[in-house]
Amino acid sequence: MSSMENEFLEKIEKHKGVIFKISKMYMDNQDDQNDLYQEIIYQAWKSYSDFQRRSDFSTWLYRTALNTAIVFLRSEKKRSFIQNQRVENIAIQQEPYNDTDDRNMKLMYEAIQQLSPIDKALIFYFLQDFPGKEIARQLGITEVNARVKMNRAKTKLKEIIEKKKTQI
């Protein structure tokens, strides 16, 4: 295994929680989440040699994962899957919580899945405590526009959650 492969695998291992969260936010069933998880790793590996280290790896991975999730969500054709066995061996691990025991977390993820891809990205950045300036930079919009869009996305999410709670 080359040093670049080792470096990539170490970084992915360190940041795999981000990939899992994005997969869970964009896909509602476990098989699709697993497929998206693998697709994100595959796309990250394909473009890793182009990673110029002008930003942190985590920032680059967020952007790559979100872009992949949006494309994956919109894609109607068969998705490509990881062919590289070394990358394929990265275990898909659940977050420490069990969403069957945590009804609120499950409700939140269900509500997030009803948002548009851009609103999902905004909520993801918000949940990761990204500052407004960084969110704006990631999305290529002004900071004011990012704040406005964030507030609208949070309002939509809150409305969906409240509606779901009344249906329970």
Image: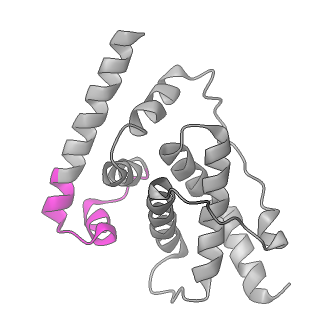
Farthest residue toward the front?
77
Report x, y in % for residue 146: 21, 59
| Relative to 21, residue 104 above or below | above
Is residue 103 magenta-colored? no
Viewed as shown, does residue 81 lie left or right of 19? right
Vertical placement of 51 versus 135: above or below?
A: below
Is 42 above or below relative to 53?
above
Is the C terminus in the top left, top right, bottom left or bottom right quadrant? top left
> Which region shows up in magenta?
128-148
Residue 74 left/right relative to 103: left
Q: Nearer the viewer, residue 106 or 3?
A: 106
**Residue in the picture at 48% in, 65% down:** 62
The residue drawn where x is 54% and y is 75% is 57
The residue depicted at 55 percent of the width and 60 percent of the height is 77
Residue 100 screen position, x and y as percent: 63, 23
165 relative to 137 in the view: left or right: right
Magenta span main SS: helix
Q: How many marks?
A: 0
In percent of width and height, residue 63 lies at 45, 68
